[in-house]
Image: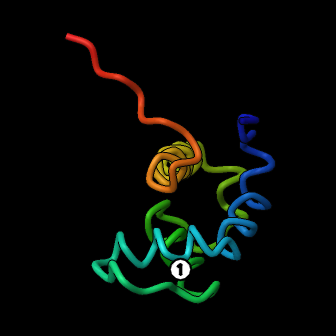
Amino acid sequence: MQKITQEKAPQRAAMLAHDVAFQRYAATRNGLSRHQFSPTAATEHLRTVCGVFSRRDLACNADAFQRFEKMHTDFLIWSGRIQAPRKYG
């Protein structure tokens, strides 16, 4: 899986909002486990989690980008697209 660069994060965020699996993930994270958000609601979830007013802010706000990366990884694990990292110890 290709790593998302900060300058490409706004475009990736826009793509995520239209991903049906992400729409389900966002609904689940908001307590609606048997629902699916619309692209607009998925975008709002993304902005709220990342703490931005616009997806464009992901390209210039390092903290927001870090939150986006964490949320994106959580989504990939939730959807089964990647495996959860193993915990040792």
**The N terminus appears in which quarter of the rendering?**
top right
**Image height of 82 relative to 23, above or below:** above
**Image height of 52 relative to 68, above or below:** below
Q: Residue furthest top?
A: 89
Amino acid type at image mark 1:
Glu
Where residue 79 appears, as percent x and y from the top left, is: 51, 56
The residue lying at 26 percent from left, 13 percent from top is 88
**The C terminus appears in which quarter of the rendering?**
top left
Q: Going by the image, does 89 lie left or right of 57? A: left
Quarter residue 11 falls in: bottom right
Q: Residues within 10 Å of mark 1 (few under 14, many from 20)?
A: some
Where residue 25 appears, as percent x and y from the top left, is: 46, 68
Q: Nearer the viewer, residue 63 or 1?
A: 1
Quarter residue 2 falls in: top right
The residue lying at 58 percent from left, 69 percent from top is 21
Where residue 20 appears, as percent x and y from the top left, is: 63, 75
The residue lying at 74 percent from left, 58 percent from top is 12
The residue lying at 35 percent from left, 69 percent from top is 29
Q: Going by the image, does 23 lie left or right of 56? A: left
Q: Nearer the viewer, residue 2 or 64?
A: 2
Q: Which residue is mark 1?
A: 44
Where residue 22 appears, as percent x and y from the top left, is: 56, 68
Q: Secondary structure at mark 1?
A: helix
